[in-house]
Amino acid sequence: MNKTILILIGISCAVITAGGIMRYRNFASPEIIAARQQLHNEDAEIRIAAIETLWKLGDKASAPEIRKLLNDNDKVACPAVIALQALGDKASVPEIRKLLKNKDSYARFFAINAMRYFDSTESAPEIRELLKDKDFGVRMQAVRALAVFNDKESIPNIKEMLKDEDEEGRRWAALSLVILCDKESVANTHSIIKLFKYFIPGELVEAIRKTGQKDLIPYIREFISDEMNNMRVSAINALSELGDKESIPLIKTRLKDEDRWVREVAEEALKKLGVTEKEIKEAKEEKK
């Protein structure tokens, strides 16, 4: 190993963040120092560039200064929200929450996304109002956030969104009602998931993991044998993410799938679920 690298490791007290970025305790690189100074530049484009630099470098110490830019013009506020979310700055939630009522649709969009990321269920009442937003992207973010929040109070509002002018909006509203355990919707879970054509929505997996609604898992298992290879892959990945060991026999059948991608994903999923290499080999060799 290079001596210079060894020296740097020895003196820097390196910390690996969740995002895989190497940060140094009690140390700010010249690039970070320069970017922090640029946060106060008169030029909005330069402030935006500084925000992006600091979040990409994982500089959590700059969060309080970036927080101040949430009150800047909308063009600057949006990247500030993204940066604070990327830096995991939960202290910024109250200020970001105010942007849910901002006149700019992008600000509302990114604010909803941040509320969901920080699991700010307290913001649900404001987000419910955004189900009627004039901007489609905002409505989409709102319905997905409320589903993940398991906000059952929003069910009547989401039912109204089943009449949304946009097909995708109606689709996400239907899925959200499944996640929120609306009886009528749950009965149609298979056909609702089928509306997504190529994938099992991550929100469904996220909600099951968060709320423990394991009664929805069998609906995902049904797609292991779907005619679309994308859907088979998505179902296998979803079940492995959920740690669903009951799906192991079904996933084993995909080790002989006609599609190589499906076979590879099935093998990785089985390993993740604790199936041994020997068992996988036996399943592959087993006659149909």
Image: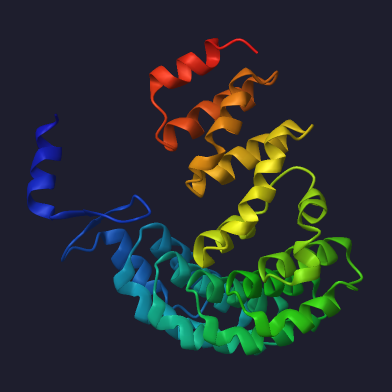
Q: Left of 114 or right of it: where is 41?
A: left
Report how many numbered discs are placed on residues in the image: 0
Q: Taking 16 as reference, is 199 left or right? A: right
Describe residue 95's horizontal placement relative to residue 288 as left or right: left
- Above or below residue 70? Residue 267 is above
The picture quadrant where one finds residue 108 is bottom right
Q: Position of residue 74 (x, y in %)?
A: 62, 80
Colouring scheme, one of rainbow, by chain, secondary structure, one colour: rainbow
Question: Residue 277, how many percent across, how many down?
Answer: 40, 21
Query: Which one is in front, 98 or 64?
Result: 98
**Picture layout, residue 199 above or below residue 119:** above
Q: Residue at x 39, y 74 (%)?
A: 89
Q: Is residue 254 above or below residue 92?
A: above
Residue 80 visible? The answer is yes
Decide which of 267, 287 is in the foreground and name it.
287
Of the 4 image quadrants, the one containing the N terminus is top left
Say which quarter of the image contains residue 78: bottom right
Residue 242 placed where, x, y %?
51, 50
Tell me where residue 56 appears, x and y as whole percent: 42, 57
Which residue corresponds to the image point at 26% horizontal and 60% vertical from the top-left? 30
Residue 40 shows in this picture: no
Front one among 66 and 109: 109
Q: What's the residue at 61%, 10% (across, down)?
A: 287
